[in-house]
């Protein structure tokens, strides 16, 4: 196979080709490729001093910043795998993930590092993401020790922890080869070049960010990370899109809807720079897609794929898709993958039939960390219908996994967290509502005489779960409704909730 | 121009709004000015937008983009200080 064999070669090669080009632009920048390269080497030196070696895992717990990007590259340069963790995650979850993947070190800015408890410090080396004093001149020139351990294509590059149905997060382990196959596809699909400016809306712990970061690095373009706090101000996101001359925007549809509803996105002409609007993670209601198609000439691309497969199908919205009253199809296989729908009796579904989407190919992950490797095709748990042209329409989930504002949440993980409170007798969690009104609702029956309150329960959950997994609504009920077989009647709860 | 409301008055209104809209009325009266709103998932991206719309309407203040920070929205105490400050400088 041609091209680089290691993910960290993308940034290093761009730094060699165009050292003065911007690697990071926007409010988090500017940082040139030469500077980012130097920071990565300096941090790699520090981490090596803490004993990080090929095959290790290093947590990167940080808001989006050039330092966090340098830390991720530093980990790769040592032949280790990085584990990005959302900066809003409680320290207890960081500890759980550190134990799950037997991490060697945690790399974080000083304010987060100070929250790492003593017991965890005995297991993990703590590395500050800030550039170490006096290790590298700011212009990236001068003597230094370049670090680049090359590993096999099938060694882990990063691990993304996602909500796990057993109550513990699961580590989706992606190899260098998996990531590179996906990035090569993205670069070709988007005809990406050094003049591009990729917005990076998603957190680094979310797989959407992989495209933003590495498609940019692959072509020596600039990545423009959206500061985390912009998420609370849709107007700032709109301003960012215009001000930064973004050429490729990639986010979940709910972010675009929020920018439209509360940020006035469609009230201004589309920025002339914008040439591709990518969305993934949840269905984009078709009546909204129509408005976006009128607003911009940019390509509208629906990308599909669980974290486990990167992106495995894609579909570009065409006029005929906009005429249907169905969401934009998830389309056809990409990234060198083979994708098909399997019927309950194990056949490959034909046109018009429904089945579970199956994926095999180069972008499919190695497996969950600490569990048996992924063997054979990956069963996504997503139900699809085969269209006459062989592409797919997304129908929904076959299990208890939901998407709320694009976040993938296993209902049972939230339920399990609720049950850890001693005054919770019974609990159920459901996603209710549609579009921007979609939210996570918890129904809780308390133990006799308990006066547990909404906020007290939230305080408990906040020690275990990141904010997006804390239910938006908490309802206390006397008991959970059951059907005549004694099975939880979630539909009854949800309909009572909506009235 | 109406007189600048006191910080406590602003806080009382914000607390009432958050209780009613996001906490099913908060029957146990747990919400205080110091309750961490973002950390406890009481303010998600959508609720924050709703709250900003309320602040603009109720207190006739502009909430400039650079004021929408995790620090300002951390709790009701910080929020009411911000609104109070905005009102005072608008009245001055």
Image (cartoon, grey):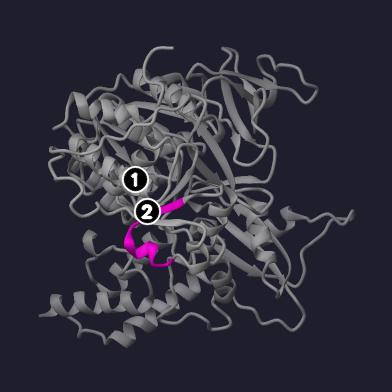
Q: Position of residue B78 (x, y in %)?
A: 32, 76
Residue B24 in view (yes/no): no
In this rendering, the label closer to the viewer, 1 or 2: 1
- Is B6 or A366 nearer to us in this picture? A366
- For the C terminus of chain A, the image quarter is bottom right
Between residues A325 and A386, which one lies in front from this camera angle? A386
Where residue B43 sits, quadrant-wise, is bottom left
Instruction: Tell me: residue A72, above or below residue A332.
Output: below
- In the image as oriented, which residue stretches furthest toward the right? A485
Pointer 2: what residue? A62
Highlighted magenta segment, given as a residue range: A105-115
Q: Nearer the viewer, residue A18 or A433?
A: A18
| SS at circle 2 | loop
Instruction: Report the disc number at residue A97.
Output: none
Which chain letter matches label 2? A
- Residue A245 in the image: state x and y as whole percent: 19, 36
**Parent chain of label 1:** A
**For the point 45% across and 82% down, which residue is it?**
B32
- The residue where tag 1 is placed is A71
Residue at point 51% right, 36% down?
A: A283
């Amino acid at each position: 196979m041609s091209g680089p064999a290691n993910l960290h070669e993308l940034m290093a090669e761009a730094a060699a080709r165009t050292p003065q080009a911007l690697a990071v632009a926007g409010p988090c920048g500017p940082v040139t490729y030469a500077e980012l390269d130097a920071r990565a080497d300096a941090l790699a030196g520090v981490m090596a001093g803490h004993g990080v070696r090929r095959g290790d895992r290093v947590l990167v717990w940080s808001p989006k910043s050039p330092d966090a990007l340098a830390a991720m590259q530093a980990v790769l340069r040592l032949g280790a795998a990085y584990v990005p963790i959302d900066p809003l995650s409680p320290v207890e979850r960081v500890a759980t993930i550190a134990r799950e993947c037997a991490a060697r070190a945690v790399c974080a800015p000083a304010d987060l590092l100070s929250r790492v408890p003593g017991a965890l410090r005995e297991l993990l080396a703590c590395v500050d993401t800030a550039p170490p004093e006096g290790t590298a001149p700011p212009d990236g020139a001068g003597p230094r020790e370049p670090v680049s351990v090359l590993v096999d294509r099938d060694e882990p590059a990063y691990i993304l922890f996602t909500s796990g149905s057993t109550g513990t997060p699961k580590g989706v382990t992606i190899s260098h080869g998996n990531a590179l196959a996906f990035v090569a596809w993205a670069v070709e699909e988007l005809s990406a070049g050094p003049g591009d400016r990729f917005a990076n809306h998603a957190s680094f712990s979310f797989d959407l960010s992989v495209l933003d970061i590495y498609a940019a690095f692959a072509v020596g373009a600039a990545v423009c990370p959206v500061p985390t706090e912009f998420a609370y101000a849709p107007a700032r996101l709109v301003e960012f899109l215009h001000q930064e001359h973004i050429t490729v925007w990639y986010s979940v549809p709910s972010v675009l809807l929020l920018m439209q509803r509360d940020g006035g996105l469609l009230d201004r002409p589309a920025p002339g720079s914008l040439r591709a609007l990518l969305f993934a993670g949840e269905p984009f209601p078709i009546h909204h897609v129509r408005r976006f198609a009128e607003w911009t000439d940019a390509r509208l691309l629906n990308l599909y794929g669980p974290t486990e497969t990167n992106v495995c199908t894609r579909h570009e919205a065409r006029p005929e898709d906009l005429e249907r009253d169905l969401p934009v199809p998830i389309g056809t296989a990409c990234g060198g993958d083979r994708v098909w729908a399997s019927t309950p009796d194990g056949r490959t579904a034909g046109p018009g039939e429904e089945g579970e989407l199956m994926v095999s190919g180069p972008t499919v992950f190695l497996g969950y960390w600490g569990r048996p490797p992924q063997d054979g095709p990956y069963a996504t748990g997503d139900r699809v219908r085969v269209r006459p042209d062989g592409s797919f329409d997304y129908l929904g989930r076959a299990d208890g996994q939901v998407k709320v504002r694009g976040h993938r949440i296993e209902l049972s993980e939230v339920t399990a967290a609720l049950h850890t409170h001693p005054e919770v007798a019974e609990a159920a969690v459901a996603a209710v509502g549609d579009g921007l009104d979609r939210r996570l609702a918890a129904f809780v029956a308390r133990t006799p005489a308990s006066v547990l309150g909404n906020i007290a329960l939230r305080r408990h959950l906040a020690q275990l779960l990141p904010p997006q997994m804390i239910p938006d609504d908490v309802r206390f009920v006397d008991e959970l409704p059951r059907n005549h077989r004694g099975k939880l009647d979630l539909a009854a709860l949800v309909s009572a909730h909506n009235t | 121009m109406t007189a600048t409301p006191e910080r406590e008055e602003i806080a009382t209104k914000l607390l009432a709004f958050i209780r009613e809209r996001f906490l099913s009325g908060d029957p146990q009266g747990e919400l205080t000015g110091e309750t961490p709103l973002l950390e406890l998932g009481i303010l998600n991206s959508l609720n924050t937008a709703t709250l900003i719309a309320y602040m603009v309407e109720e207190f006739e203040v502009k909430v400039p983009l650079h004021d929408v920070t995790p620090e300002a929205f951390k709790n009701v105490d910080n929020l009411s200080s911000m609104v109070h400050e905005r009102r005072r400088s608008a009245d001055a």
